[in-house]
Image (cartoon, helix red, strand yellow):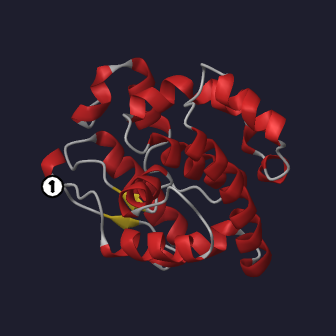
Amino acid sequence: MKRCPWSEGSKLYRDYHDNEWGVPVHDDRILFEFLILESMQAGLSWITILKKRKRFNQVFDNFEFNRIVEYSDQKIDNLLQDKGIVRNKLKVLAAVRNAEAFIRVREKFESFDKYIWQFTDGRQKTNRFNKIAEIPTTTAESIAMSKDLKKKGFQFIGPKVCYAFMQAIGMVNDHLTTCDRHYQIEKNITRTQK
């Protein structure tokens, strides 16, 4: 299988690349998981987060936002002692605040999915990049998304984090044109949108 070069570094990267990256997500719990993981990744490498993902799921109650919103000071202290996750106090506190904001958005828009996909008009944007250097770190959509999420109370959610989130949940297909997954995802999207 031909893959994007960034995914060849480890089995974790390959599995993520082959099965998740760029595949459209519409499940609110999974959207919340990626939102938190991407915000935890700010300033770190994505492989660091992938290595810690299983533990994140365990200690963050499988990213059930209705549970995270109720985290006590003791629970937060316990998280900050857990070497299996990113122990940045501001990021951990942001995860709880982001759960609160996430719930408010769901109440207003019926689902977070309905809200977040409006930034690409409800459809995946398929890019046609030939080299990694061509892939942007921000776009007009990610800047608009970041601005709006911040207005709604979200934290650690700048334009770069938003664009990485958009890539992760398949709002954009940034697999290179030399990568088999680019066409597999595009074909599936075309079939489902007919």
Q: What residue sits 56% from the left and 77% below the top? A: 151
Say left or right for 13 vs 57.
Answer: left
Specify the quadrant of the image occupied by residue 25.
bottom right
- Please state the horizontal and vertical placement of residue 115, each as a whole percent of the image: 62, 75
The total of numbered circles placed on residues is 1
> Quick check: 190 above or below 62?
below
Query: Which residue is at 51% across, 54% downward?
Result: 169
Describe the element under mark 1 as helix, strand or loop.
helix
**Image height of 20 relative to 114, above or below:** above
Front residue of this view, candidates 150 and 110: 150
Asked whether residue 59 appears in the rendered view, the answer is: no
Left or right? Give the position of 5 relative to 119: left
Position of residue 97 in the picture relative to residue 150 (left or right): right
177 on left or right of 152: left
Q: Amino acid at mark 1?
A: Glu
> Where does residue 192 sit, x and y in percent of width and height?
54, 64
Q: What quarter of the picture does the N terminus occupy?
A: top left
Residue position for label 1: 134
Camera sees residue 118: yes
**Residue at 37% from the left image edge and 68% from the top image edge:** 125
Q: For label 1, count other residues whose C-alpha is less than 10 Å away and answer few (under 14), some (14-19) or many (20+).
A: few
Q: Residue 88 at x, y = what percent?
A: 55, 36
> Going 27% across and 57% down the picture, which residue do you hit?
137
Report x, y in % for residue 71.
Answer: 82, 44
